[in-house]
């Protein structure tokens, strides 16, 4: 049970990091990300940020539940 909760939490955190852009492909992300920022709409950025925050919080909740079950 604890392993399943940890896996679900890890998957949520990884998807959240992908949505927020934590794993850039470019060698110099601070220079290369500017065109990406200006090419997407504000609604798209808002959706990505909101989805990343929700998935990150869900992942942290699953990690917390797994930790409580492990301790108890």
Image (cartoon, rainbow, N blue to C red):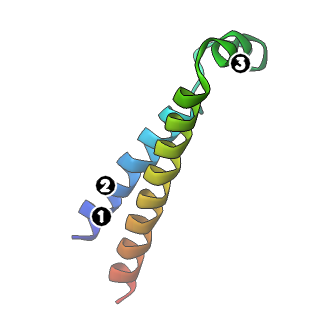
Give me the disc on residue 5: 1
Q: CA distance from mark 3 to mark 1?
A: 33 Å
Q: Quadrant location of the N terminus? A: bottom left
The answer for how far apart the CA atoms under marks 2 and 3 are is 29 Å
Q: Position of residue 30 (x, y in %)?
A: 77, 20
First in sequence: mark 3 vs mark 1: 1
Up the image or down, 6 lies above or below 51; here it is below
Kindly state the secondary structure of the residue where label 1 is placed.
helix
Q: Is residue 50 left or right of residue 15?
A: right
Q: Is residue 60 left or right of residue 40?
A: left
Q: What SS does tag 2 mark?
A: helix
Q: Position of residue 27 (x, y in %)?
A: 69, 12
Quarter holding the C terminus?
bottom left
Disc 2 marks which residue? 8
Q: Quadrant of residue 49?
A: top right
In the image, is residue 27 above or below residue 1? Answer: above
Mark 1 and mark 2 in contact (Cβ < 8 Å)? yes
Q: Which residue is mark 3?
A: 29
Who comes first in sequence, dot 2 or dot 3?
2
Of 66 and 34, which appears nearest the observer?
A: 34
Residue sitting at x 57%, y 36%: 46
Q: Is residue 46 left or right of residue 30?
A: left
Instruction: Residue 14 in the image: state x and y as whole percent.
Output: 44, 42
Given the current orientation, which residue lies at the most extreme bottom position? 72
Of 41 and 27, which appears nearest the observer?
41
Tell me what residue is drawn at x 35 percent, y 79 percent. Answer: 70
Q: CA distance from mark 2 to mark 1?
A: 5 Å
């Amino acid at each position: 049970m604890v392993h399943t909760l940890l896996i679900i939490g890890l998957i949520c955190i990884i998807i959240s990091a992908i949505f927020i852009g934590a794993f850039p492909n470019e060698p110099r992300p601070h220079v290369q990300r500017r065109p990406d920022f200006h090419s997407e709409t504000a609604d798209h950025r808002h959706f990505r940020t909101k989805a990343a925050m929700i998935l990150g919080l869900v992942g942290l909740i699953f990690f917390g539940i797994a930790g409580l079950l492990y301790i108890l």
